[in-house]
Image (cartoon, rainbow, N blue to C red):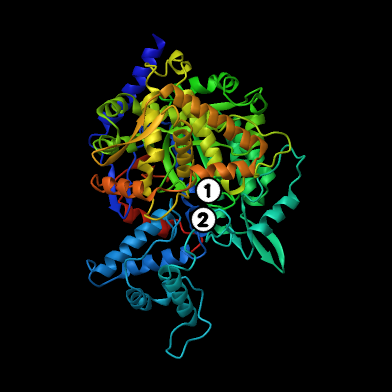
Amino acid sequence: MRKMILAAAVAAMSLNAMAQNTDFNYHVDRFADIEVLRYQVPGFDKLTLKQKKLVYYLQEAALQGRDILFDQNGKYNLYVRQVLEQIYTRYTGDRSSADFKGLELYLKQVWFGNGIYHHYGMDKFVPQFSINFFVDEYNKLPLDVLPINSCDRCTEEGKCDKATRLRKALEKVIFDPEFMPKKVNQADGEDLILTSATNLYDGVTQAEVEAYYNALKNPNDTTPISYGLNTKVVKEDGKVVEKPYKVGGLYSQAIVNIIYWLQKAKKVAETSAQRDYIEKLIEFYTTGSLKTFDEYSIMWAEDTKSQVDFINGFIESYGDPLGMTGSWESIVNFRNDAASHRTQLISSNAQWFEDNSPVDPRFKKENVKGVSAKVITAAILAGDSYPSTPIGINLPNSNWIRAQHGSKSVTLENITDAYDEVANGSGLNEEFAYSQAEVDMMKRHLTLADKLHTDLHECLGHASGQLLPGVDPDALKAYGSTLEEGRADLFALYYLADPKLVDLGIFDSPDAYKAEYYKYIMNGLMTQLYRIEPGKNIEESHMRNRKFISEWCLQKGKKDKVIEMVKRKGKTYVRINDYEKLRGLFGQLLAEVQRIKSEGDFEAGRKLVETYGVKVDPKLHAEVLKRYNTLDIAPYKGFVNPIYKPVLDAKGNIVDITVHYGENYVDQMLRYSRDYSPLTK
């Protein structure tokens, strides 16, 4: 009876969320390949005043880091944003002209990508406005709104020399397609630092950086720091050196502002443990010490009692071609107690899942520690989690901290609800699914199966397995992120079909997993290709991992026709003939990917990704793009944030915090640039 009640409750929560959202307008803006949405923050009004204050202070700390990410993503990004915003807001000509509309489109893309590069494809945006238009409007701007300090001298034409140099630099950055064309290059065999425009390195080669860190690492260190996580690597006087992100170092003013709001948050912390790790985070920002960051990460991971929680710092390394430096990000959230029941069931059985994994026993954890999981309501998204955001998170990333102290996993329920709401009626499954049977199966089971895949991926997938003694956590180099995401996906896929989930009462049908299996393979082999430009290969880590898993299973299962690509009326479809054998293939690949990670087998990892995860069939790609165009679906989605407003009494004391929706995309971005730009003042 318990399993039926739980499954019904989860389904009811999803239906209730939809019912409550009937008067809420999710749609905000649509441009290029982007759709911008809103998300709700249900339950915020039920928090205590102290908790509301904590959310408010933490979201202010989150918004103060915006400039950091812009600068990490490219050395010219802040200049481009400042100048284009000034042109946009001051323009007095025809705002319906092709040039102005092109500038508006480009600026919206820059805001969404936190710079001049696509947030997923990594290629530089192509401007749809002329260079002459840009020069004319730039020259009209007052000097005091340009990102220059003061003029050294005037040119013969009476113009400021710094303003002229800035204009010429921006002309090259924006309009020259060959200049710094890609934020992160992952092409095999190339110098990934010299060919990437990300602003994490300067004047150094890939070989020099790898040699520098190899000299620092001790293979016998069982608690290594996350080398390079919060530094820019440059060459000074012929030597490779690190410049840390800290108070008094790089991004100092932004970090000072973050600390200001963290200090306020510390005073209204829910528990002494939370107060202590906020203080430890402040210490990390002040000193830049990665040992301190590890101490903070342990304290944060071990606090499972606080309802309000957050991440804030240099976290994920997808923006680094070598997978080392963390992009700045923050998410503030609070626990959804009702929806967290399923994740608590999973995490409480973590040892069972680890023991029964199909990987070599040498790579399993004998004693799984501190795996906690919860479903959360996101209150604010910032940095690398805004406007595009993940739907699940598992942290800390440090392998030894996971093994010795555990990790925390979260699923962002209100974000997935927003995605589900706008996906209704899109026609995607009807167009690409093999038959009505698959369409009906996904309608019945996919909402829960998809969320459960995320839960298993974040809660147990990332937390599973272990490195062999002496293996460098960075041994897989540029392929590390792809293989880690693939490992977590495979763990989740393998266990979705396990009867254990029915026994736990999470699934009410032993066939529910098939909905996620079908969607995953269809996406990995076909539908995700609509995010790729014609003639391009797959470069983003998550897309590569979905591709190598799906393609490997297709090829390895050919003899038994586990998966087939079939043609009907000129269209290609995925047909899964044997779901049980597909689960077996997922298990085989999971065992191999875990071996690769545990042993640090770079060459095997490189071969797996390059063979199955990179290349795109141009004919299939063209077909997918053509079919998608008939659906009018934006390939990428992101969000605007709600606004939190303090309510004050006559003495200026906060007596309530209210949450407000309705701000549009342009107004939010301009407000953020006005109120949260500590690096451009």
Could you say where residue 578 lies in the image, as x and y percent from the top left?
Answer: 40, 24
- Tell me which corner region of the image, top left, top right, bottom left or bottom right, holds residue 205: bottom right
Residue of label 2: 184
* Viewer-nearest residue: 167 or 485: 485
> Circle 1 — which element?
loop
Residue of label 1: 318
Residue at 63% x, 44% y: name it.
602
Mark 1 or mark 2, earlier in chain: 2
* Viewer-nearest residue: 81 or 168: 168
In the image, what residue type sits under mark 2?
Answer: Val
Callout 1–callout 2 Cβ contact below 8 Å: yes
Could you say where residue 120 lies in the image, as x and y percent from the top left?
Answer: 43, 50
In space, the residues marked 1 and 2 are separated at their CA atoms by 9 Å
In the image, what residue type sits under mark 1?
Answer: Tyr
Q: Which mark is residue 348?
A: none
> Circle 2 — which element?
loop
Could you say where residue 507 lies in the image, as x and y percent from the top left?
Answer: 40, 18
Check disc 2: other Cα within 10 Å, few if <14, some if 14-19, many if 20+: many
In this rendering, the count of numbered labels is 2
Q: Quarter holding the N terminus?
A: top left
Could you say where residue 544 lies in the image, as x and y percent from the top left?
Answer: 48, 44
* Viewer-nearest residue: 14 or 436: 436
